[in-house]
Image: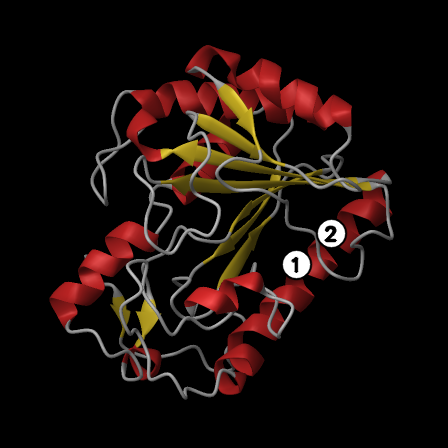
Amino acid sequence: MNDILDSPDAAGAPDSFAILPGAVHSPVLLHVPHSSRQVPAPVREGILLGDAALASELDHITDAHTAELAAAVAEAAGLTPWRFVNRLSRLVVDPERFPDEREEMLAVGMGAVYTRTTHRAPLRPADTDPRPLVDRYFHPYARAMTAAVADRLAVTGRAVIIDVHSYPTARLPYELHGDGPRPPICLGTDSFHTPPELVALAEKAFAGLGEVGIDSPFAGAYVPLRYYEREPQVGALMVEIRRDTYMTEPGGPVGPGFARLVTALTTLVDALGG
C-alpha cells in the first residue's frame, strides 16, 4: 500500500475529504475522520520517522477499515446515510482536535498537528509551527463538515452525526484516560448533543457484539463548533469499536466480525433514519 501521496491537492481542501451523498431525507451523517493512511509528500517531509517507523505508526494510529464499514452500511441501510470521510491520515491534521490551547491532547504532543507518536516518540520537531497545516487542511475540513450538517438541518430539520472510530485492545502510551474498561463497543457521548434515546438505540443495535460501554476508554462526540451546545437538533454519538472484534491488530485485514459489525451499525442507522 502506498501511504504517501505524490502530489498534494491543489488548494489543500477539495481532495482532502469526501462528502458522499445519501438519501435526501436521511438526517444521518456517518463521519469517518481517522480511516486513511495517506500523507501528502510535502507533509511527509516534516515527519521525523523513517519509512518503516512511519508505517508502524500508521498501523497503530489509523482506524483501519472504518471507511469500508461506513460504505457497507450505506449500501445496506434502508435509507442511505450521508458520509463525510477524511481522505488523509490524522498525522496530517486531526480534524477532531481543537486547533488551539483548549485541546487537552496537547499534553502528549497530539493536538490538531501531532508532534509525538502513539508511543510518545518525536514525530515532528517540537518547535513545529502548526498553523500552515491547520490553515491548509483543518479549517477547510471544519467548514465543509459544518456545511454538511447545515444541509441536513435545512432539509430534514435535524442532523445525527455518528462518528465512526476504532481503538486498540491494549492501551497505548498516548492515551490520557485509558485505564478504564475497554469493551467491544464504546459509545462516546456529549451531555448536550447525545440524548438518552440515541444511546438506547445504539446499545440495542450493538448488544449482539458483546458489552457496550459508555465513555470509556474514550469519551465525547464530534459536533461542529457552530452548533456545539447551541443547536439541540444536532445529535452526536461516537462509536468506538475495539479492533480485535473485527480485524487483525495493529494494521491487518478484516476478520469475520466485520460482517456482524456492518449489521449492527446498519441497524442503528435504520433506527435513526425515519
Q: Amino acid at mark 1?
A: Met
x and y, in percent, of residue 213 in the image: 53, 25
x and y, in percent, of residue 208 in the image: 46, 11
Q: Nearer the viewer, residue 181 or 139?
A: 181
Name the side, left or right, on which 109 lies relative to 251: right
SS of the residue at dot 1? helix
Name the side, left or right, on which 17 lies relative to 5: right
Taking the view exactly as shown, the residue that stands out farthest to the front is 179
Question: What quarter of the picture does the C terminus occupy?
Answer: top right
Classed neighbour count for the residue bearing mark 2: other residues with Cα under 10 Å, few (<14), some (14–19), many (≥20): many
14 relative to 261, above or below: below
Residue found at x 61% / y 46%? 21
Residue found at x 34% / y 26%? 258
Q: Nearer the viewer, residue 64 or 80?
A: 64
* Residue 2 seen anywhere in this rendered image of the structure: no
Identify the residue under disc 2: 149
Residue found at x 47% / y 27%? 185
Is the residue under label 1 in contact with that under label 2 (CB below 8 Å)? yes
Q: Which mark is residue 229?
A: none
Q: Nearer the viewer, residue 186 or 162?
A: 186
Marks 2/1: CA distance?
6 Å
SS of the residue at dot 2? helix
Identify the residue under disc 1: 145
Q: Amino acid at mark 2?
A: Val
Classed neighbour count for the residue bearing mark 1: other residues with Cα under 10 Å, few (<14), some (14–19), many (≥20): many
* Residue 127 seen anywhere in this rendered image of the structure: yes
x and y, in percent, of residue 139 in the image: 62, 73
